[in-house]
Amino acid sequence: MHGYEQWGLRGLAERLQGIFAFAVYDAVEHTLSLARDPLGVKPLYWWSDGNALLFASEMKSLLRHPALRDRKVNRSGIAQFLVTRYVSRPNTMFDGVSRLPEGCCMTVDVNGRVPEEPLRYWDVRYRPEQVGLEEATELLDSVLKRTVDMQLMSDVPLGVQLSGGVDSSIVVALMETLRREKGDPARVKTFSVGFDVAGFSELAYARQVAERYGTEHHEITVGFRDFAEELPFLAWIYDEPMGEPPGIPTYFMCREAKRHVSVMLCGEGADEQFGGYSKYMFDQFSAALDWVPAGVRSGLLRSVARGLPFEGRRLRSMTEILAIADAPRRFASWYGGFDTELQASVLSDTMRNEIGDGGLSEGFREIVNACDSNGALDRFLYCDIHTRLVDDILVKSDRMSMGAGIEARVPFLDHKLVEFAARLPQQLKVSGLNSKIVLKRLAERYLPRETIYRRKVGFTVPLTRWFTGPWRGLIDEVLLSDRCLDRGYCNADVVRAIVSDHLNRRVDREQGIWLMLALEIWHRLFVDEDGSEAAVDRVKADFARPLGRLAAAA
């Protein structure tokens, strides 16, 4: 409050370091101001009709207001969700309900007038400096250690989400290093989650890191029964359709962790700062294809993709996306739920006419053009920070942790560290088939090489095994029901063909099937029902027959 009095809204927001979303009512100026942290770790929704303003950290809170009882679905939001797995801010799944963008603030006067655009008080700028790998590693060690130390400030028990990957393992290593330097007798508490299906767990790798640093380690194993029984409740917590099924095991991990801690550090955001995803490596090859005419490029690569086997889903998806010459459209398509040829055909004719050609990628184009760098990797990282990270990954992290009563902190998304990473040359992030180069070099100081350079597994959900087995009834009775197909969002014939291709192992469509199923569950909770907690029980009853069979089969 004193900061607001001293520096005003923007001056205060610029000086804060951490994660936040807040509102300030100024009784002198008769204004209400809203602000959100630089990277958008914490959510902030708002709605206004020009006379009244509603705001909340969860959209479901706004939906309880009488003015939103007759809410309308944002059809362009549904279209984007089916293509990219999320809806880009400031839009949401409902017309008129907006998200305050990351790094922004806005002020509303007493008459309820909302500014045309929020005020951006912070953005990442890519201005690479000449620095070598060893010097960059030393600087990163110092910056990251200082950031982790700052985020250890807490008056409640604190732990770490340990996946066994490089990012969370570095956080554990730095926490343990700081603990020893300070002579703190309390052991670091670590928590890991995996599935009870072989090949879908990193628990063994997380255990190795925990043993190396002597942490108080807790492992949580999630089975099909857990997943199926809690699905409507977790869809309600999520507020939006659950585009990322790995968020569900995160909830179970946080629920168990709540018995021991109230705050957890995690490794989210490192990939977007240091080029950790495989898509950043593969997108480099796009420049080598720019000399090929767009039509030839598209036809050739899509022909190659169609010839790949069922087990080659990821390679097929990457080949399909590299067929897109236009960078914003390509960025929008990476890690989407459908192959690019299906992205339009899965939508109904009415939806396609409403959205128009290119409508889904125009928001990405604006963001890419706002980047102050011409470097291909910089522009891709900048786009991800302002789209998938804030609108998808951080939504998953916040909903699932807060739903279990855990505050998740993200050292890699401290804006000072983000600014440092943006000053590093691109070749210290991605070069050829090497990714996260400087971060992995730092990890060599703390972790064995086999932990750093092994193939990443992640929180991969065994969807295909469930869709072709115990979840078959849910697909038949929910996704392929007349109630679902008659909503008019999707082309019913295409939906049936997608399911048939997957169940008969012609083409792996597990991600697309999950998206359509997640959309239907969300629709039943927040459109057919009123979005209240009581609606969860009613939707569970709606699913009682297929879910009952699933639980019995599991």
Image (tube, rainbow, N blue to C red):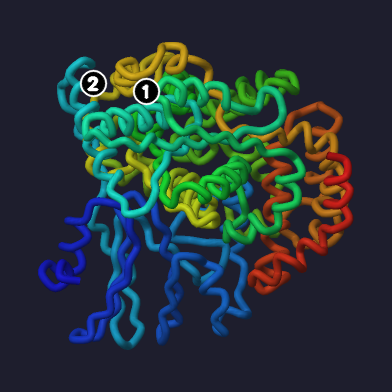
Q: CA distance from mark 2 to mark 1?
A: 11 Å
Residue 97 in picture, x, y percent from top left: 49, 69
For the C terminus, give its image quadrant.
Answer: top right
Q: Residue at x 24, y 33 (%)?
A: 183
Is 276 placed above or below 150 here? above
Residue 195 in picture, x, y percent from top left: 67, 33
Q: Residue at x 38, y 49 (%)?
A: 366
Q: Residue at x 82, y 58 (%)?
A: 543
**Can the viewer see residue 177?**
yes
Please give the residue where the numbered disc 1 appears in the rendered image: 436
* Callout 1 amino acid: Lys
Q: Quadrant of residue 297?
A: top right
For the N terminus, give its image quadrant.
Answer: bottom left
Specify the label residue 399 is tagged with.
Answer: none
How packed is label 1: few (under 14 Cα within 10 Å), some, or many (20 or more)?
many
Residue 30 in picture, x, y percent from top left: 24, 86
Residue 104 relative to residue 142: left or right: right
Q: Residue at x 83, y 51 (%)?
A: 547
Query: Which numbered disc flags the more N-terminal residue, 2 or 1?
Result: 2
Q: Residue furthest left?
A: 6
How packed is label 2: few (under 14 Cα within 10 Å), some, or many (20 or more)?
many
Check disc 2 and report its element: helix, strand or loop: helix
- Counting labels gives 2
Please give the residue where the numbered disc 2 appears in the rendered image: 137
Q: Quadrant of residue 116?
A: bottom left
In this orientation, which residue lies closer to the viewer: 319 or 51?
51
Q: Nearer the viewer, mark 2 or mark 1?
A: 2
In this orientation, which residue lies closer to the viewer: 293 or 449?
449
In this orientation, which residue lies closer to the viewer: 83 or 184?
184
Check disc 1 and report its element: helix, strand or loop: loop
* Callout 2 amino acid: Thr
